[in-house]
Amino acid sequence: MITLEKTEEKFEISNVTRRSFLQTALSTSAFVLAVGKSPLLATAARSGAPSLTPGSVPTIDATAFHPGMYLGIQSDGTVLIVAHRTEMGNGVRTSLPRILADELDADWSRVKVIQGDADERYGSQDTDGSHSVREFFEPLREAGATARLMLIRAAAQQWGVPESQCVADPVHAVSHRSSNRTLGYGELAAAAAKLPVPKKEELKFKSPQEWRYIGKPAPGYDVTDVCAGKPLFGMDVRVDGMLYAAIAHPPVLGGKVKSVDDAATLKVKGVQKTIAIDPFKAPHAFQPLGGVAVIADNTWSAFKGRNQLKIEWDNGAHAGYNSADYKKQLQQTARQPGKAVKTVGDPDAEFAKGGKIIEAEYFAPHLAHASMEPPVAVADVRGEKVTVWSPTQNPVGVQEEVAKALGLKKENITCHVTFLGGGFGRKSKPDYAVEAAVLSKKTGKPVKVVWSREDDIKFDYFHSVAAMYLKASVDDKGMPKAWVQRSVFPPIGSTFDKDAVYSGEGEMSLGWNVIPFDVANFRSENGPATAHVRIGWLRSVANIYHAFAVQSFANELAYAANRDPYEYLMALIGPGRNVDAGQEPEMAKKYPYDTARLRHVAELAAERAEWGKRKPGNGWGMGIAVHRSFLSYIASVAEVVVDSNKTVNVRRVTTVVDAGIVANPDMVRSQFEGAAVFGTSLTRTGEITATNGVIDQSNFNDYPVARMNDAPAHIDVHIVESSAAPAGVGEPGVPPMAPAICNAIYAATGQRIRELPLTRNGLA
Amino acid sequence: MIHLKVNGQAQTFDGDPEMPLLWYLRDILGLTGTKFGCGMALCGACTVLENGKAIRSCSKQMGKVEGLEITTIEGISAHGPHAVQKAWAEVNVPQCGYCQPGQIMQTVSLLSTKPHPTDTDIDDEMAGNICRCGTYQRIRAAIKEAAKEMA
């Protein structure tokens, strides 16, 4: 194990200036590295921790060029790039470093990627909202261009020639063509390190035609280690002297332990003790749920011991939560006028004129994330200092929550970020890391908290259940003149404010306040709903139920008008134009809501899926849905066969993506292939329910997720070439799936699906 | 005392005979390539080979492994990556990667009995292995690639 102190000492002699390297991304203080506490090196040191990133411990040399937060160049030419965002299948450990390496003109085979610890100086590390590339595309290019210019200057000085005569070519080297001299980046590192950091105005950025990595497909940086089963994940962390913990959580949210009988537990071989964990103080936010922890020598003993606990619970206020009744309540609320959130024109005046009115109600249940790796974390509390190893989407959140729970300073919490065995939003909430820290403090040893699959499903931060009502008044061609839509769901805000019953800007902005249709009179509304479980965000969040309702309703309007659903959808979108999406002016300028781009993806999807070539019916059909989310434009066509057993077979999904500039097209393709499966999964079988406040589901037997034989048999992803600013790719593939599949089922069978999942409709 | 072989090495175990092989591999031997996903043989993340055939290590108690030869992801190839691992990298299968050791072990088992699997063979054999990231299409392609390579 490399010692952290020594490594940092060494780095004090490297020339890291006080000046901001990436002012646009980070606060000025972010680059004050004068104390020599480089996060890059801190991370390098942690690589020596047991079982983490084997073989990737870089030997940091004293002459290394280390111009900022994300980058270091060793004298042997190795380029170290920090991935400060979380790898959870999103490919950020490949795509982000390649953006920097491109602008640096570095040889990718000589790049070593290092995972960044929690450190606010990196800028946001909260890996959610499909932000990684769009937020860091420019800062990473700037980092690369800055270092390249410094290397060029170092070479020019060494040769005594004008800087303008030197170029970063061939890759990983600087050349002076007329004198035929070349120096490698490693040879220039020490000299470059002595130079002042150039101003942004001095930088020269490559044109897209010159890009060597951006926009070119590349395999995952870690693919070999992943396939070798290397210990990369939170579940794989092993620390010397570590104890294992399993926790019996209160079965109902807010429940408390009345009494515990742990006699049988303590007889289980390997069990050391049981420890009570305090219940949270409302709002629950990211605090542990409380309960009783079983501390043992290994995971199995902890699980077995937990099964032997006899606990009497005080279930508290949410013990009356029953999904069937709750559904009726939400539906009734959705039938009443709600709080108007966004209004265009005067829909009430238009409705008052009479004419043909079409209404529909939709319903979608709670969902659990069920990432393959259940929540897990290791914490080691030593006096005032804490080290946490956690699969987390939110490393700084781990620091904050652990600090809060233990009454320590945030700076004293080190959070090493492991690979995530899936996240989907669940691992943005650090409750399980806090549990590990609390138990480490109480035992005086490093503790690994392992959630079982049952814990994961029963004690999730659930994707919200939602009831929606839509109403349109249509003209004689079936086109809407007025459109009102109302959405009712327990808001994510309830996790942070126990009295929250309305959505803030959050959920309503996810596919509900703005529809991409050319309707003169429109209103979105929100009705109140009280949460009885922890509500959180799940891959694409409220877009899931909102796109389901809007895109299904559009399909219903098409049939009501006796028109082809694709042709009708295009008419509904109307001519290409910029829609006021309520974005901040700067965002609206960089990312206008451009319906021409939506039309384009829809056209391409229909064409690639061969829409209209075969007559639907007799159990075969196609459905189309479009949706813009996370600034990307997506169209999906699902082709389904519904057999005589009412089994729905999604034979083919055609997805067309316009996400602006894409960093790594192969990974973007992966994300949309995966989203098609994720979306199919929630459409077919995704449903979490509660009885008397207790979640009914527990494992993959009663919360089935898509397997190979019931996932779409073929997924065709097409990426539109674009020079627009990069947009999100991790989430936007999910929302169109449910309506595309349900619209296809209608085309195939005439059965309209207004409630998810399909299993609620006699289908599977 | 229970005797078994793991990746060719003789091992003995005298702990709780109810302990699943999975936790013995992970917590006692430190072979963490075999993953915990469900604990009920529902997801396949814990797949290892028992005398060459895929089993779910989460549901195999240590009391029942006497004399068995167990192979984990760490032990499928003595010299560099296995053909299946190479195919996985070639197709760039993994997203998060957590389930992939299990998928790879299941594939090694499949190809040992069916060197040229059809789509139906693949679907039948792999249906027990969940990938929540949804890499199934690429898994299918990689299996065919590996089959070609190994033929």
Image: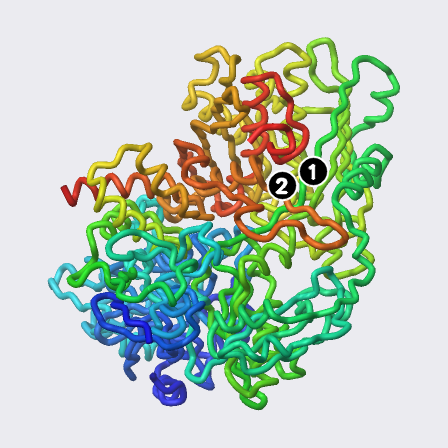
Return the residue at label 2: A543
**Neighbour tally class for label 1: few under 14, some 14-19, many 20 plus, Cα within 10 Å:** many
Q: Give, as a three-letter code, the residue at label 1.
A: Trp
Q: Position of residue A664 (x, y in %)?
A: 37, 47
Number of numbered discs overlaid on the protein picture:
2
Q: Reply above or below: B137 against A172.
A: above
Tell me, yes or no, if residue A740 can be seen here: yes
Query: Quadrant of the rendered structure where residue B64 is?
Result: bottom left
Rendered residue at 47%/36% (across/down): A658
Q: Earlier in the sequence, mark 1 or mark 2?
A: 1
Mark 2 lies on a secondary structure that is helix
Give the SS element for disc 1: loop
Quick one: quadrant of the N terminus of chain A? bottom left
Question: Marks 1 and 2, how far apart in space?
Answer: 8 Å
In front: mark 1 or mark 2? 2
Give left or right: position of A493 versus B102.
Answer: right
Q: Is residue B129 above or below residue A518?
A: below
Position of A590 with respect to B96 (left or right) is right
Numbered mark located on residue A702 in the image:
none
Q: Is residue A81 visible?
A: no
Q: Amino acid at mark 2?
A: Asn
Q: Chain of mark 1?
A: A
The chain ID associated with circle 2 is A
Q: Quadrant of residue A750?
A: top right
Give the percent coordinates (x, y) of residue A149: 32, 65
Q: Which mark is residue A512?
A: 1
What residue is shown at x 76% (from left), y 41% (from top)? Answer: A324
The spot of residue A328 in percent (x, y) is 80, 38
Image coordinates of residue B116 in percent, x first then y, are 21, 37
Residue at (58% x, 88% y) in the render: A384
